[in-house]
Image (cartoon, rainbow, N blue to C red):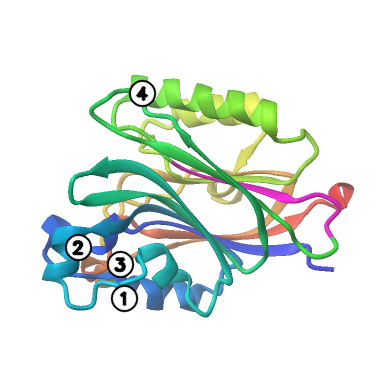
Amino acid sequence: MHNTLNIATFNIHKGVTHFNARFALHHQRDLLRKLKADVVFLQEVRDAHAQHSKRFAAWPVTGQAEYLAEAVWPDYAYGKNSVYPAGHHGNALLSKFPIINTTNIDISAHSSEERGMLHCEIEIPQWSAPLHSICVHLGLFAQWRREQLLVVADYIRQHVPAQAPLIIAGDFNDWGMRTGRIFAESLQMHEVFEQHTGKPARSFPSWLPILRLDRIYVRGFQIKHAEVHSGTNFLKVSDHAMLTANLVKHDSLY
C-alpha cells in the first residue's frame, strides 16, 4: 500500500533569476526531477509572457507548468492568479497520481497584489479518501497574510473533511512565524520542519538562507524526513530554496 509520499515546494521566480537576468526554467526542471517527488507545489509559475517568450529562446511553447510536468508528473494543475497585459502567473501543482478535482481561489487582500490558493484533490491507489493538496502564495504585508490565512482556513473547514489527509505548502512570506502558527493551530496541522527540527526552514535567499518564508503544513501524516535544498548553485536557479518532505500517512486514515 502506497502510504509514503515525497513532496516538494518551490517558488520558481517565474522561471528566471534575479532581475530577469537569466532564464532558469531548464535548471529548475532538472533539480525538481532529481528530487523524485510524488507531488510538487510551485509558486510564481509564469505560464504566459509575450516579451519573455521572445527574449528567451528556450521559453516553452506549452507554458511553464506543462514543461515542468512533462514525462515525470502525468497530472498537473495551474491556477492563474496575477494577470497583466504581457501574460499571467500563479500557482501550480504537479502530481504522479490522478488529480480528480481542482479549485483555484482568489485570496488577494489588496488590489495591488494578486494572490491565490490552488486546491487539488488527488486520488492515490488504495487510499479510502483523496489527498487534499493546497498550494498558496501569501502577501508581503503581515495584515494581508492574516486576512488571507483566515480565508484559507475558512475554505478548508467548508471543503476538506476533518479526517481527510491534507497538505498545505508554498511561499507564506511569514518571516515572523506567528501568523503561520496561529493558522496551523486553528486547523490542528503541523509544520513539517518545525516538527522535525524545531523551527520552520530557512529558505530565502536560496544561496544563503536567512528568512523562514516557505512552509509545509500537514494533517494526518507523520514526518520521516525534511530537507532544505539550497546553496550557491541556486544563484542560477531561484531566490527561494526548495523544500522537501517524506511523509507517512497515519493508519487511522485508511
Q: Is residue 211 above or below residue 27?
A: above
* Mark earlier in primary sequence (1, 2): 2
Q: Nearer the viewer, mark 3 or mark 1?
A: 1
Q: Nearer the viewer, residue 105 or 18?
A: 105
Q: Nearer the viewer, mark 4 or mark 1?
A: 4
Q: Which residues are magenta?
A: 127-136
The N terminus - image quarter: bottom right
3D distance between C-alphas at marks 3 and 4: 33 Å
Q: Nearer the viewer, mark 3 or mark 4?
A: 4
Q: Secondary structure at mark 4?
A: loop
* Mark earlier in primary sequence (3, 2): 2
Residue beneath label 3, please?
A: 231
- Mark 4–mark 2 CB contact (< 8 Å): no
| Residue 212 visible in image | no
Residue beneath label 1, please?
A: 27
3D distance between C-alphas at marks 3 and 2: 14 Å
Q: Nearer the viewer, mark 3 or mark 2?
A: 2
Q: Secondary structure at mark 3?
A: loop
3D distance between C-alphas at marks 1 and 2: 11 Å
Q: Nearer the viewer, residue 126 or 83?
A: 83
- Mark 3–mark 1 CB contact (< 8 Å): no
Residue 219 point in image, percent of width and height: 69, 42
* Mark earlier in primary sequence (4, 2): 2
- Amino acid of disc 1: His
